Image (cartoon, rainbow, N blue to C red):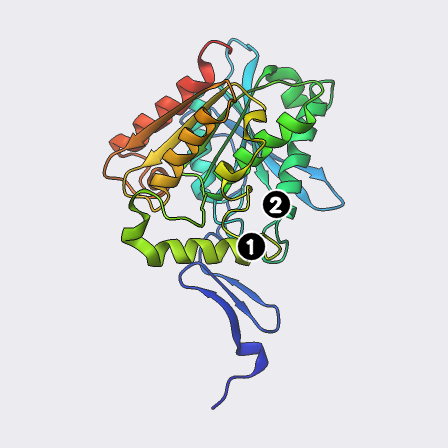
């Protein structure tokens, strides 16, 4: 029996996402959510806020246990999921960010940008930039948690996978447009989702995986110029040297399809004339976003401590 138009699949990424001809979207993972809370083990508190009622852009805020009531660095966190699955409210990210807030003593704004394919790129970028500007404007008054607890001279961006891609592109936008009341002190890119037309490093050993990653980029950004779009391959951006901060940490996983792209990003940034300091750390024997799936393993705990120390180092 022939399938009906409603049942016909037009985009299929197994175990990830499926889109039907009638427009229905089926997310095959990353759909669970948890409410904000006060974590009994760490004292980390969280709450949800609406940034733009018109678009529904929202975020989950986290503050550390604050016995001395100091001003803390602030981290804008952009979740992964290929721009298409997961949210700021998923248990995976909620639990990870509680651990990071407790370890680093930072305030976190976990951005719930709108997702593809209902909201194709550049909408996730535009939502992310709106969240950056919301934090920037709060430096002059606004959301009470941020106004009371944040040192706006120590703003950081971080994200994993597609979120790492967002981090880079938000850093480029800070470089071109600037901030008014806040200062971007640094960025952390965890296994960032980058690509490129030409094969590099060990990519030839996994052509099928690279093909899927490249195909997915076109799926979420159908107006792209392709795999060498500077949004996806920063090494092709003639304005790379204008990145809007002076220190960057790239977290790499040895068995990640993106491993060589992540090292390539570090090298391209160093060669661009940017003038900041970029460091890459590699987790041996680990795969893509391993720290989210196995947060208590040795390498995940070591990465958590490194990200935390990066945000607490002396100002650059």
Horizontally, residue 278 falls left or right of residue 60, namely left
* Mark 1, secondary structure of its residue: helix
Left or right position of 202 against 33: left
Q: What residue is rendered at 41% in x and 48% in y?
A: 198
The residue nearer to you, when weighing 77 against 219, is 219
- Whether residue 40 is visible: no
**Residue labelled with disc 2:** 124
Q: Secondary structure at mark 2?
A: helix
**Residue 83 visible at all:** yes
Crowding at dot 2, Cα within 10 Å, few <14 / some 14-19 / many 20+, comes out as many
Mark 1 or mark 2, whichever is nearer to me: 1
Name which residue lies at 49% across and 18% down.
276
Q: Residue furthest left?
A: 285
Q: Is residue 296 left or right of residue 30?
A: left
Image point (76%, 45%), residue name: 54
Q: How many marks?
A: 2
Above or below: residue 160 compared with residue 227: above
Relative to residue 61, is residue 69 depicted above or below?
Answer: above
* Res 173 → quadrant: top right
Residue most extreme to the bottom: 1
Sequence-wise, the earlier of marks 1 and 2 is 2
Label at residue 220: 1
């Amino acid at each position: 029996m022939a399938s009906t138009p409603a049942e016909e699949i037009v985009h299929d990424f197994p175990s990830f996402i499926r889109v039907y001809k009638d427009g229905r979207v089926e997310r095959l993972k990353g759909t669970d959510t948890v409410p904000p809370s006060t974590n009994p083990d760490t004292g980390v508190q969280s709450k949800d806020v609406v940034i733009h009622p018109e678009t529904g852009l929202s975020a989950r805020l986290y503050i550390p246990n604050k016995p001395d009531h100091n001003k803390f660095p602030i981290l804008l966190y952009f979740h992964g999921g290929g721009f298409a699955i997961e949210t700021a409210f998923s248990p995976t990210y909620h639990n990870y960010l509680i651990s990071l807030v407790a370890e680093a003593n930072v305030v976190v704004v976990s951005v719930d940008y709108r997702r593809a394919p209902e909201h194709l790129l550049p909408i996730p970028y535009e939502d992310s930039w709106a969240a950056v500007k919301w934090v920037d404007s709060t430096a002059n008054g606004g959301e009470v948690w941020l106004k009371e607890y944040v040192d706006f001279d120590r703003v950081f961006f971080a994200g994993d996978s597609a979120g790492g891609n967002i981090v880079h592109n938000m850093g480029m936008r800070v470089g071109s447009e600037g901030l008014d009341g806040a200062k971007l002190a640094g960025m952390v890119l965890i296994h960032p989702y980058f690509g490129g037309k030409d094969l590099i490093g060990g990519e030839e050993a996994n052509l099928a995986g690279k093909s899927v990653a490249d195909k997915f980029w076109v799926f979420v950004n159908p107006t792209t110029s392709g795999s060498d779009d500077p949004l996806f391959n920063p090494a092709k951006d003639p304005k790379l040297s204008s990145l809007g901060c002076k220190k960057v940490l790239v977290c790499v996983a040895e068995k990640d399809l993106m491993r060589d792209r992540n090292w390539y990003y570090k090298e391209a940034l160093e060669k661009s004339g940017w003038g900041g300091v970029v460091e890459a750390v590699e987790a041996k024997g680990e795969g893509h976003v391993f720290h989210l799936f196995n947060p208590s393993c040795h390498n995940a705990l070591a990465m958590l401590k490194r990200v935390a120390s990066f945000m607490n180092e002396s100002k650059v």
